[in-house]
Amino acid sequence: MSHIALARFSAVLTASVATTPVLLGSVASAFVAAVAMSEEAFACKAGYYGNTATSGSAASAGCTEAGVGYYVPTAGALTETAAGTGFYVPTAGATKETAAGVGNYVSTMAATTETQATAGNYVGTTGASAETAAGVGYYVPTAGASKETAAGAGYYVSSTGASSESALQPPYYSASTGLTSSQASVPTAGNYVPAAAATKETPAGAGYYVSTSGATSETPVQAGYYDTHAGQTASTRAVALPVGYYSATAGLSASSLATPSPPGFYVGSTGMTAPTQAQPGYYAAGTGATNQTRDLAGFYTPVGAPAQIPCPTGLTCTGGILPGITTTGYTLLSSPAPGTYSLGAATLRIPLGSTTATQFSLTAPGDTPYQITGWGLGGANPGLFTVDGLYVGEDIAAGQTIDFSVLFDPIAYGLSSALLTIDTTDGGDPNYTITLDGQAIPEPASIAGLLSGLAGLGWVGWLKRRSRNGKDRSEGSLGRAGSG
């Protein structure tokens, strides 16, 4: 072989040898890539985990679905991952965990649900692993809250984890929110706090005052006085009611709220709590009278009279006093009504134009019954008296009582009288005699306007006397249940 040929052969051989490793490396790289492509094609997908699959299906043998509370974020995973605190996984085959929402939290690993914050607590962010207790001055009234609520004005919260606020109690008040103590502001003198949950102090009203701080009530100005100013610390600015007016009520805020003296009464001094009745022989006309007026000659008045009354014909009124009439007269009531009129023990007196009935009773004494055989009216004025309830032939059992009445109906001023005689079968003394006296007195229109009438208290009696065995003896009983 020539040198030239040998050199060519060497060159070829060298080239062949030189290029051979390149060809082998390319074949090896291609093989490795092919194997890797085959492994990737058959790995478990996200949400599943396990060994390499033997086919292209993720659900084929060797791949397991991630359970609830767990997740698999990428393909080819060999294990599942538990949900962390603050997160949860509610379904199987999950590729990610879910953060707990606001108002909820997750305190454990591998949770399948989130937990709602309880009342008194809140969760203000997502992904929380615990609830937060409401701070002092705050409260959370419902479950699942995302924030706490500040105690309102007039309320406080003194501990953590509260589900409600507490009302401030008198005398405390506060206009601020988020209060942490029941010891809040107290009212100053001239003011008070009357109720719970107060946001401000209340000034003493007109007619009232508050002398100290920390008060829960106001004090009324004394009866007989008034005060138009509010927020007072004392009653020094109170003013006495003027003459002619009175009030038994404390705490008046104006003199216009006082009561004027009614007819028959007067108020002669300031600061009075009640009016004064006009004395007998005096009268007080109209309302708001400041004094009583002396009766003129020929007139009379009982106590508390609103006008003087002419003296009846035939009678002499001395010093404004009618003979036989005591000093007890009209009675002041809350509304016009008949007064009390005391008339002594001899005569029943009533205003002319009025009538009055007096009740009587008749009792059969001892063990003997008897019968009424007759009765009659006599004397000076029998026509002015009427008997009702007394019947001829009526039987009265032994020891029993019957009732009847006598009506007095005068037609003129002055005294009237009559005799009532009752006949019975009483063998000892069958006749009963009752003396009836009455007097009509004037009633002026001004009195009638205030009073509906005058009721009389008088005495009417019966007298039955007979002599038996040389002695005077009364038998039976005939008396009255008087009118008032």
Image: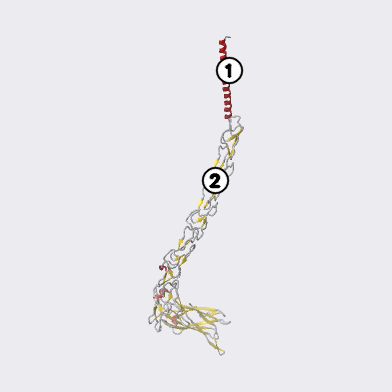
Q: Residues within 10 Å of mark 2 (few under 14, many from 20)?
A: many
Residue under pointer 1: 17
Given residues 400 and 239, the one toward you in this image is 239
Per the image, label 1 sits on a secondary structure element best described as: helix
Q: What quarter of the picture does the N terminus occupy?
A: top right
Q: Residues within 10 Å of mark 1 (few under 14, many from 20)?
A: few
Which amino acid does the dot numbered 2 rest on?
Answer: Asn
Is residue 305 shown above or below 108? Answer: below
Place residue 234 in its image quadrant.
Answer: bottom left
Q: Residue furthest bottom?
A: 470
Q: Nearer the viewer, mark 1 or mark 2?
A: 1
Direction from residue 396 to residue 268 in the image, left or right: left
The tag earlier along the polypeptide, 1 or 2, is: 1
Query: Coloured how?
Result: secondary structure
Given residues 120 and 67, the one toward you in this image is 120
Horizontal and vertical percent position of residue 329: 44, 78
Horizontal and vertical percent position of residue 168: 51, 58
Horizontal and vertical percent position of residue 179: 50, 54
Residue under pointer 2: 104
Horizontal and vertical percent position of residue 306: 40, 76
Q: How many marks?
A: 2
Is residue 74 shown above or below 388? Answer: above
Which amino acid does the dot numbered 1 rest on?
Answer: Val
Q: CA distance from mark 1 to mark 2?
A: 74 Å
Given residues 442 and 71, the one toward you in this image is 71
